[in-house]
Amino acid sequence: MSALAFASAHADSPQLAKLGRPATPAEIKAWDIDVRPDFTGLPPGAGSVARGQEVWESRCENCHGAFGESNEVFTPIIGGTTADDVKTGHVASLRSDTVPQRTTLMKVSELSVLWDYINRAMPWNQPKSLPTDDVYAVVAYILNLGGVVPSDYVLSDKNMQATQNRLPNRNGKTREHGLWEQGAKPDVQGSSCMSNCAPKVTITSHLPDYARNAHGDIALQNRTLGGVRGAETLEPAPQTFVALAARNKGAAAAGGGASDPMKMAQQHACLACHGIGNKIVGPALLDVHKKYAAQRPADAIRLLTVRIKSGGTGAWGSTAMPPQDHVPDAEIRAIAEWIAAGKFQ
């Protein structure tokens, strides 16, 4: 109810009638900052990928990682999309088990949503503090990290629609269901389990086995009071996903990489950044081995395991190593033992 309507409704109460006042146009404008799917409300401005990288490194990287891949604070922004997805507008990995979790760029279907959220909510400790041009720049940098736009791209209010037409999941939203049509059947009828219900649900997770424990044991992360309990994720998933795990294990065995640390390192792209005896992006594995050689073997393995899983920066220069928490714990430990032993031949 507006202040004017409130005053009119309580005209017989002089004290209540004096409460409040109509909002001024300037006050309304300060709150009316939403950007709609058709880009109504989008302010004029522009930002380059290069400027976006500068803003990202100073204000975004701590939570989201150097390449938008971090899973430490929030779920990853970048990953799981391909050049074919940019062409089709449908993210193929949403229909497969190849990606352990869905990233922002996999899910978002409207560029206005990404722009609007960053504008009104980021950085989390200083929301709405980014200048408009920097919001354009950060969005451009995110799209560049995802392979949507080139490194010399400048995003602006003038080319937002053209950029929207390259978003990997732009065609991922559907309105072909009952809730979008008046008079049609709703999606949920509420009758499928009203009688003869199964006494116990046996499948508690729809995550593939390699991703079940990506965030630690979910059962230990829920409140201790009340009826809500998290699924036990330390053990393999029951029923259907046991078969999936067995299938994945069989595929790995067929490729010969199930027990060979060198092949595990190749499979998980470790050797794309670390040569055995030469530095590539990160240090040579031989140098890593020498650094930890003074440690007790058990301590070296423990430290390497944590470093591989959590990632980090500073130990070997400014280049960040992204966390590898999507790799199964047993394989991370096997790679850590391999590096600690230094037996690379």
Image: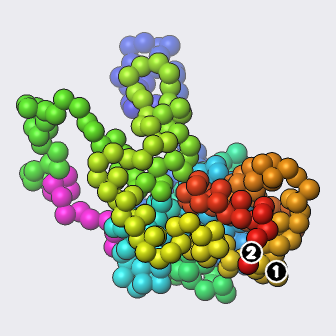
Q: Tell me: 303 left or right of 103.
A: right
Residue range (magenta):
171-181
State the mark number for residue 74. none
Identity of the residue drawn at 83% across and 66% down? 289
Q: Amino acid at mark 1?
A: Gly
Q: Residues within 10 Å of mark 1 (few under 14, many from 20)?
A: few
Of the two numbered discs 2 and 1 on the same chain, state the one appearing first in sequence: 1
- In percent of width and height, residue 177 lies at 18, 58
Q: Is the stretch drawn in magenta largely helix, strand or loop?
A: loop
Coloration mode = rainbow
Residue 127, compared with residue 162, is above or below; it is above
Residue bearing mark 2: 344
Secondary structure beneath label 1: loop
The C terminus is located in which quarter? bottom right
Q: Amino acid at mark 2?
A: Phe
Residue bearing mark 1: 277
Confirm whether the magenta stretch covers residue 179: yes
Identity of the residue drawn at 74% across and 49% down? 302
Please identify the quarter of the rendering in which residue 12 is found.
top left
Q: Tell me: 47 left or right of 184.
A: right
Identity of the residue drawn at 34% across and 41% down? 204
Residue 259 appears anywhere in the view: yes
Q: Tell me: 288 left or right of 241.
A: right
Q: Nearer the viewer, residue 172 or 163?
A: 172
Q: Nearer the viewer, residue 201 or 154?
A: 201
Disc 2/disc 1 C-alpha distance (Å): 9 Å
